[in-house]
Image: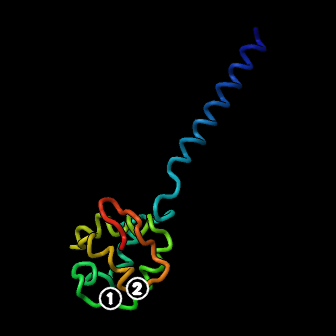
Amino acid sequence: MEAAMKNICLLVAFLVILGVAQFDGAYGAGECGKSNPDTEAWKLAPCAAAAQDANAAVSSKCCSQVKRIGQNPSCLCAVMLSNTAKTSGVKPEVALTIPKRCNIADRPVGYKCGAYTLP
């Protein structure tokens, strides 16, 4: 009886530890790794005008940031559709054209960002 109770206690302890380990894993990296898409959106401040007007010139600073963030298409989408981008007046359908306007050769063409597709 004592051995059975000890085994049950060990099993319960193991399950608790396993549960905590699994629970902790749920808060891993998101679309932009450990960075928040809203934080990454601030790094695209040089793109503000180009993200609101399809005819606006795209600066080299903007292109370099888009190229860096664009290495991870899901992060680029999350940034361009973030609350920070929305509140700053970014038009997603225009913002998603920036990689093409920057002539980034290895851009994620055809990648779906919500209801939008990267051209």
Task: Tell me the distance, in whole angstroms, between the alpha carbons under discs 1 and 2.
Answer: 7 Å
Q: Residue at x 40, y 71 (%)?
A: 40
Q: Residue at x 30, y 75 (%)?
A: 95
Q: Could you say which quadrant of the image residue 19 lies in?
A: top right
Report the number of numbered marks: 2
Pointer 2: residues within 10 angstroms few (<14), some, or many (20+)? many
Residue 94 coordinates in the image, percent (x, y): 26, 75
4 to 17, vertically: above or below: above
34 to 98, vertically: above or below: above
Q: Secondary structure at mark 1?
A: loop
**Which of disc 2 and disc 1 is earlier in sequence?**
1
- Colouring scheme, one of rainbow, by chain, secondary structure, one colour: rainbow
44 to 4, vertically: above or below: below
Q: Tell me the tag on residue 63.
A: 2
18 to 84, vertically: above or below: above
Residue at the limit of the structure toward the top, as seen here: 1
Q: Residue at x 76, y 12 (%)?
A: 2
Tell me the quadrant of the picture where the C terminus can be found: bottom left
Q: Give the residue type at disc 1.
A: Val
Of residues 29 and 56, the one drawn nearer to the viewer in this rendering: 56
Residue at the limit of the structure toward the right, as seen here: 3
Residue 32 coordinates in the image, percent (x, y): 47, 65
Q: Give the residue type at disc 2.
A: Cys
Residue 118 coordinates in the image, percent (x, y): 36, 70
Pointer 1: residues within 10 angstroms few (<14), some, or many (20+)? some
Tell me the quadrant of the picture where the N terminus can be found: top right
Q: Tell me the tag on residue 35.
A: none
Q: Residue at x 38, y 66 (%)?
A: 77
Residue 51 relative to residue 36: left or right: left
Residue 113 coordinates in the image, percent (x, y): 36, 63
Q: Which residue is mark 1?
A: 58
